[in-house]
C-alpha cells in the first residue's frame, strides 16, 4: 500500500508501529483506509468515500502491532479519558491531542431501573458526563486531533445539536475557526450551548438531511475539516472508546446484550467494532454480545427494515421529538442492520409519548437525566425486556448518550411542581394531606 | 432537456475537475446515459450492475432525493438542477 513503506525504517521502529506516510514518519498503528463496499484501498488522507463506488472508507489497523504493544496494565496506567486507548485510535501517537477530558464516563449498575424492567444485571453507560454532555465529544476529540495533523485550520460540521456543541467547544480549545450548520428548528438549549463557544453558527432553513446535503456541497468547495464529511473515517472511530470502556469497567469482558440508539447507525457499528477489537488484541474473550438498536417511531428507517426482514433501507422524512436521532437517510444504516442481525439483537422503535415516559423512568429510578435520544434507548430497553428479547440475567448495557438539559422542550407540560401553595405551613399540610 | 448537474469531489477526476457540468435527458436515467457519453466511467460509478443507483449515492432533482420521487424515471424540467451527493454520516 502507498501509505505504508516501512521497509525504509529500522526494524525496531516498525515493531513499534512506525509507518512512513506521504513523506513524513508517523508513529501510528494505522495502515490506510479501505472501502467497506468494494475493498479498494486508499492512503491516510482527508477523504471519506470510495472514488469508485461511493462506499464509506474505514481505517485499517495493524492489530498484531497493537496487540504487541497494548496490555490491560498499559491501558490502566493511561489517562482517565478516551486517550488511554490511543493505540486503537486513528491518530499519530505523538500528535498533540485536542482534548477536553473526554470519556471514561460512569458505568452505573442500574438496580432500580432493572427491578422495574425485570433485569437483574442492568448497567447504564452514562455518557451525559462528557465536556459538552454527550458522546459526541469522543468522536470530535479524535476528529480534530487528526484534522490538526492534516494541517486544517477550520473545523466544520452539520449537526442536530450534540455534534454542534462538541465541535464548537473543541475548535475553541484547539484555536481553530469553526463553521457549524444546524437545522433552524433545533432546540433552543442546543443553539445557545453551541453559540457560547463562538463558532460561525449557521441556522439552515431545512431538516437535518437537507443541512447535511448542503454541507456535502460546501465540503467540496472549501478545504475545511468537516468532521462528519471528509474527516468521517477518523471521527467515527472515536465511538469505539465507549465499548472499550464498557469492557474495562465490567472487569475485562464484553456485556451479553447492549442497547444503542441509531441515528446514522455509526455508533452502533462502532460499539460492535470496539468489542471485537478488544477480543482481537487479546484483552477480552471472544465476543458474544447481542447488539440491539433503538429508534423513534417518527424516524425509524432501520427499525422498519429490521422488522420487515429486508436489507433495503428506505429513506424517510423524520418527524420526532428525538431530533438528535432524526436522520431519515442513515449513512451507516446497512451496517447497523447487519450488526444487529449478525449478533442476534433486535431493533425497537417508540412513540414520542413513550420516549418522554422513558426519560422520566430513567430519571426517577437512577437519577440520570437524559435527552430525548436516551429516552428512545430506555423505551427500547423496556420493550426488549418485556418481550423477553433480553433475558432477566443477561449482563445488559444501555447507552445513554446525551444530557436532558439539551431537550427541555420535551418535558414542558409533562413535569412540574407537585403542589403550588401559599406561605403558611397549613397550606403545605393541606396540599399533602399531612 | 439540458440541465445543470453538480458533481461531488470523488467524481471530479472524470469531469476534468469541474464541479458543475451540463447534460441532457428527459429523466434521470437518460441524464446518466448522457453523462456517461460525455464523461466515460460515470455510469459505472453511479449505478450498480443491475442498473440501479448505488446505495451510497444520492441523486437530488431540485431539492428532492429521487428516492422520494420516481427514482431513475424522475422527469427533468427545464432549469432544474441535479446534484449528486455521497451518503452522509451522522451528526446527531
Image (cartoon, coloured by chain):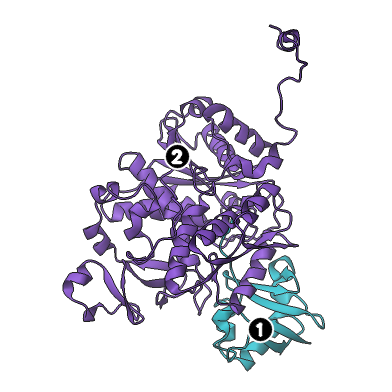
Between the residue at mark 2 and the residue at mark 1, the CA separation in whole angstroms equals 47 Å
Q: Which part of the image, by quadrant, shows the N terminus of chain A?
A: bottom left
Q: Quadrant of residue B68?
A: bottom right
Q: Which mark is residue B32?
A: 1
Mark 1: which secondary structure? helix
Q: Is residue A196 above or below residue B1?
A: above
Q: Which mark is residue A397?
A: 2
Q: Which chain is purple?
A: A
At a point 31% along the width and 67% down the height, the residue shown is A28
2 vs 1, front mark: 2
A56 left or right, relative to A248? right
The picture places residue A69, in percent across and down from the top left corner, at 23, 59
| Chain at numbered mark 1 | B
Q: Is residue B69 above or below residue A164?
A: below
Circle 1 packing at 10 Å, graded few (<14), some (14-19), many (20+), is many
Q: Is residue A28 above or below residue A370?
A: below
**Same chain for the residues under marks 2 and 1 in the image:** no
The picture places residue A292, in percent across and down from the top left corner, at 50, 45
A227 left or right, relative to B25? left
Q: Which chain is cyan?
A: B
Amino acid at each position: 500500500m502507498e501509505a505504508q513503506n516501512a521497509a525504509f525504517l529500522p526494524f525496531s521502529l516498525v515493531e513499534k508501529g512506525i509507518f512512513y506516510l506521504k513523506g513524513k514518519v508517523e508513529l501510528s498503528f494505522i495502515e490506510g483506509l479501505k472501502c467497506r463496499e468494494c475493498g479498494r484501498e486508499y492512503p491516510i488522507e482527508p477523504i471519506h468515500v470510495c472514488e469508485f463506488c461511493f462506499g464509506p472508507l474505514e481505517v485499517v489497523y495493524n492489530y498484531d502491532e497493537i496487540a504487541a504493544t497494548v496490555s490491560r496494565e498499559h491501558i490502566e496506567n493511561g489517562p482517565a479519558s478516551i486517550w488511554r486507548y490511543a493505540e486503537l485510535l486513528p491518530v499519530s501517537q505523538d500528535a498533540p491531542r485536542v482534548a477536553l477530558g473526554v470519556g471514561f464516563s460512569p458505568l452505573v449498575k442500574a438496580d432500580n431501573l432493572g427491578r422495574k424492567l425485570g433485569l437483574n444485571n442492568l448497567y447504564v453507560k452514562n455518557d451525559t458526563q462528557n465536556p459538552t454532555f454527550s458522546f459526541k465529544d469522543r468522536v470530535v476529540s479524535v476528529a480534530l486531533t487528526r484534522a490538526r495533523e492534516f494541517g486544517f485550520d477550520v473545523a466544520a460540521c452539520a449537526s442536530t445539536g450534540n455534534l454542534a456543541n462538541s465541535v464548537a467547544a473543541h475548535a475553541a480549545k484547539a484555536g481553530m475557526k469553526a463553521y457549524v450548520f444546524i437545522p433552524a428548528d433545533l432546540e433552543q438549549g442546543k443553539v445557545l450551548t453551541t453559540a457560547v463557544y463562538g463558532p460561525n453558527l449557521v441556522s439552515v432553513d431545512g431538516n437535518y438531511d437537507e443541512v447535511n446535503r448542503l454541507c456535502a456541497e460546501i465540503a467540496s468547495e472549501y478545504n475545511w475539516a468537516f468532521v462528519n464529511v471528509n474527516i468521517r473515517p477518523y471521527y467515527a472511530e472515536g465511538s469505539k472508546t465507549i465499548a472499550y470502556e464498557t469492557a474495562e469497567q465490567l472487569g475485562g469482558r464484553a456485556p451479553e446484550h447492549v442497547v444503542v440508539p441509531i441515528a446514522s447507525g455509526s455508533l452502533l457499528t462502532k460499539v460492535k467494532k470496539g468489542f471485537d477489537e478488544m477480543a482481537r488484541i487479546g484483552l477480552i474473550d471472544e465476543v458474544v454480545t447481542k447488539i440491539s438498536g433503538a429508534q423513534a417511531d417518527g424516524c425509524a428507517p432501520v427499525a422498519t427494515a429490521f422488522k420487515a426482514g429486508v436489507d433495503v433501507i428506505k429513506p424517510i422524512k423524520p418527524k420526532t421529538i428525538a431530533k438528535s436521532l432524526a436522520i431519515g437517510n442513515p449513512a451507516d444504516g446497512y451496517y447497523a442492520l447487519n450488526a444487529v442481525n449478525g449478533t442476534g439483537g433486535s431493533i425497537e422503535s417508540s412513540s414520542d409519548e413513550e420516549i418522554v415516559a422513558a426519560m422520566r423512568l430513567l430519571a426517577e429510578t437512577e437519577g440520570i437525566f437524559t435527552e430525548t435520544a436516551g429516552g428512545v434507548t430506555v423505551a427500547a430497553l423496556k420493550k426488549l425486556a418485556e418481550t423477553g428479547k433480553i433475558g432477566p440475567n443477561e449482563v445488559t448495557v444501555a447507552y445513554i448518550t446525551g444530557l436532558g438539559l439539551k431537550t427541555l422542550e420535551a418535558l414542558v407540560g409533562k413535569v412540574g411542581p407537585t403542589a403550588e401553595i401559599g406561605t403558611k405551613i397549613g397550606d403545605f399540610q393541606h396540599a399533602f394531606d399531612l | 432537456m439540458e440541465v445543470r448537474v453538480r458533481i461531488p469531489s470523488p467524481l471530479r477526476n472524470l469531469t476534468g475537475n469541474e464541479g458543475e457540468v451540463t447534460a441532457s435527458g428527459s429523466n434521470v436515467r437518460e441524464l446518466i446515459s448522457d453523462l456517461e457519453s460525455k464523461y466515460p466511467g460515470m455510469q459505472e460509478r453511479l449505478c450498480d450492475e443491475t442498473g440501479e443507483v448505488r446505495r451510497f449515492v444520492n441523486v437530488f432533482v431540485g431539492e428532492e432525493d429521487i428516492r422520494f420521487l420516481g427514482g431513475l424515471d424522475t422527469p427533468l424540467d427545464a432549469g432544474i438542477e441535479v446534484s449528486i451527493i455521497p451518503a452522509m454520516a451522522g451528526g446527531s
